[in-house]
């Protein structure tokens, strides 16, 4: 049975019915649609943008690229697809990743099941009919047996509540909602607020254009060089030749990549040997340095050794000693805020047209019509860029009014932080699936590998329900409780909980501070999910109602 939903939009065809509603048409939503179609289920996806791509649609800021290597950051589900696409660089730029996702949508004819420029505003579980009632901002209503949230972990941009934030009279942009037409900064005085992964990618590019660039830095970032380079036919051929083995390695690794942690401690390694390893990994580029030794994430002294190595590199790169000092992170362990991977970030501060404004001793007082005032002065600006991040992991879910059995709202249930079973579902919300939800490895992993694992699990689960003539699945509260304890216990053994990161919700005032992703590793997690499924979906209540 093929989907019968057409591509027309609007309130005219209200009260559509589908087996599954998918929210979002990025990497997760597209693959979910593909799997649902193969199962013969009627699926309809809603996407706020006017095309596919999700995160890669909205994040068009200069310098935006993936910080996982392109060859690993690709779907694995279709060999034909893999052979039909060639990445041009080690770390693909945003435009190329978006083109890849468009290629996927076209190749598998997925667009016909997607309603674009349509935002889901509520999802209400109707207990009597055992259906989700989905409402959109265009007035559509769809009733569906199942609802899959493929709405992204980093898809709700956050503009900070700085006094006067809306009074700026010049042009302003958030990196997560970049204009499709691009922005020309030539001849402009530009201010960038934010030095996370995004700021570090953006700053070198803006510096090349702007008359003057002021970087307003609250917390300095640890960053490793990408050592980006063009990929030649030989790179893909080599990867493809070993693909089966490489894929298995990624799927069973800690992070869903080819970084395989050694059984080697930083502290048990002689200093000269350690230096040699760090130097080699630094020169190879990418995140390898973070995943070689086995104690960086758990032992403060081990972590400090690696942090010191990176600090020394900053000092060697940045010519002005005061700027180098201000760019050097010291207040949190390396890797506990997301490690950045950059191209010429620190080098950018050697340019005459770039000024670092460290906010530690000169905090922002307010944004004015003409720029930005700190405690010590006013910076006149033509453009202001917010690289200030996202309401991560829960933002996209909680901006939808989701109501489960008995009308309970997800916002209420998650008031003290998200609670899930395996990051795949949450008790009290039957037939609702989360792709890379909180409590799963999600943002601590190669998202494409994690997305495929989740989508496969969900699709297999839907098939199992169908085969057993069941139509209702819901996580059991006690299993959710146990899973959350496990997630918290693992996080508590690491240094991650020592940093005020968006992993902890610390970037959003008032957001509960709980460590949201699962730190047990992609491979371990995959095995646990597979065991749960093999054990008849242990921890879920299954039923047939109606
Ligand atoms: P992040 O990692 O949340 O970084 C946001 C940056 O903005 C960070 O440096 C913040 O400083 C800074 N920020 C936020 N609010 C303010 C205010 N009010 N004043 C000054 N500075 C502020 O977001 P990114 O977009 O860089 O990266 C998100 C993920 O997207 C990334 O990890 C990849 O996975 C893709 P703070 O550190 O909070 O002091």
Image (cartoon, rainbow, N blue to C red):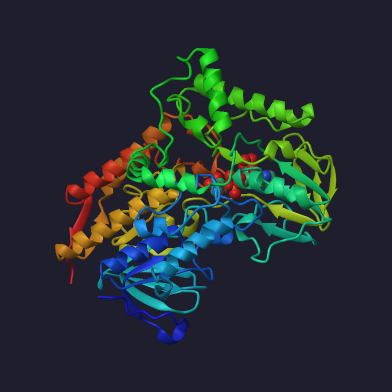
**Residue under the point 15% across and 66% down:** 469
Residue at far left of view = 468
Q: Nearer the viewer, residue 475 or 8?
A: 8
User: Percent x, y for residue 432?
Assistant: 33, 61
Occupied quadrant, residue 341: top right
Q: Is 313 situated left or right of 395 in this image? A: right
Quadrant in the picture for the C terminus = bottom left
Q: Nearer the viewer, residue 260 or 234?
A: 234
Asked if residue 122 can be seen in this view, the reply is no
Q: Nearer the viewer, residue 330 or 323?
A: 323
Q: Is residue 264 above or below residue 394?
A: above
Residue at far bottom of view = 12
Q: Is 291 situated left or right of 378 in this image? A: left
Q: Is residue 301 above or below residue 261?
A: above
Q: Is residue 518 above or below residue 447?
A: above
Quadrant in the picture for the N terminus = bottom left
**Residue under the point 39% across and 41% down:** 518
**Residue under the point 35% across and 65% down:** 34
């Amino acid at each position: 049975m093929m989907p019968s939903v057409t591509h027309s939009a609007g309130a005219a065809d209200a009260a559509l019915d589908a087996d599954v509603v998918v929210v979002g048409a990025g990497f997760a939503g597209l693959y979910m649609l593909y799997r649902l179609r193969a199962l013969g289920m009627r699926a309809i996806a809603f996407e706020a943008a006017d095309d596919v791509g999700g995160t890669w649609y909205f994040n068009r800021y200069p310098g935006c690229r993936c910080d996982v290597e392109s060859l690993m950051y690709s779907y694995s589900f279709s060999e034909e697809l893999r052979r039909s696409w060639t990445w041009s660089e080690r770390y693909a730029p945003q435009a190329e990743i978006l083109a890849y996702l468009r290629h996927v949508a076209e190749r598998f004819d997925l667009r016909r099941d997607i309603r674009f420029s349509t935002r889901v505003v509520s999802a209400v579980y109707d207990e009597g009919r055992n259906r989700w009632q989905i409402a959109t901002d265009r007035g559509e209503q769809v009733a569906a047996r199942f609802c899959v949230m493929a709405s992204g972990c980093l898809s709700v941009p956050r503009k900070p509540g700085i006094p006067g934030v809306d009074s700026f009279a010049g042009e302003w942009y958030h990196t997560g909602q970049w204009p499709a037409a691009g922005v020309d900064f030539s001849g402009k005085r530009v201010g960038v607020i934010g030095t996370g992964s995004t700021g570090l990618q953006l700053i070198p590019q803006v510096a090349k254009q702007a008359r003057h660039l002021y970087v307003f830095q609250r917390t300095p970032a640890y960053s490793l060089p990408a050592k980006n380079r063009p990929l030649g036919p030989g790179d893909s051929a080599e990867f493809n030749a070993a693909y089966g083995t490489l894929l298995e390695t990624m799927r069973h690794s800690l992070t869903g990549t080819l970084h395989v942690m050694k059984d080697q401690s930083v502290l048990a390694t002689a200093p000269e040997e350690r230096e040699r390893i760090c130097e080699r990994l630094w020169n190879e580029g990418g995140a390898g340095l973070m995943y070689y030794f086995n104690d960086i994430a758990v032992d403060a002294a081990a972590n400090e050794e690696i942090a010191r190595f990176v600090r020394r590199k900053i000092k060697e790169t940045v010519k002005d000693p005061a700027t180098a000092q201000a760019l050097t992170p010291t207040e949190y362990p390396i890797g506990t805020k997301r490690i950045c991977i950059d191209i010429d970030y620190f080098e950018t501060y050697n340019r005459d047209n770039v000024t670092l404004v460290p906010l530690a001793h000169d905090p922002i007082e307010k944004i004015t019509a003409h720029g930005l005032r700190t405690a010590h002065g006013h910076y006149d600006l033509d453009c202001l860029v917010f690289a200030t991040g996202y309401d991560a992991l829960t933002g996209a879910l909680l901006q939808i009014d989701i109501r489960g059995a008995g009308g309970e709202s997800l916002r209420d249930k998650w008031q003290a932080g998200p609670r899930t079973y395996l990051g795949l579902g949450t008790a009290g919300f039957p037939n609702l699936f989360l792709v890379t939800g909180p409590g799963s490895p999600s943002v601590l992993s190669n998202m494409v590998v994690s997305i495929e694992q989740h989508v496969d699990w969900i699709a297999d689960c839907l098939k199992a329900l169908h085969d057993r003539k069941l139509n209702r699945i819901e996580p059991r509260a006690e299993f959710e409780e146990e899973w959350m304890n496990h997630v918290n216990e693992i996080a508590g053994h690491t240094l991650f909980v020592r940093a005020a990161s968006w992993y902890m919700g610390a970037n959003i005032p008032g957001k509960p501070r709980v460590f949201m992703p699962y730190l047990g590793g992609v491979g371990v997690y995959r095995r646990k999910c597979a065991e749960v499924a093999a054990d008849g979906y242990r921890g879920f209540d299954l039923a047939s109602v109606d």
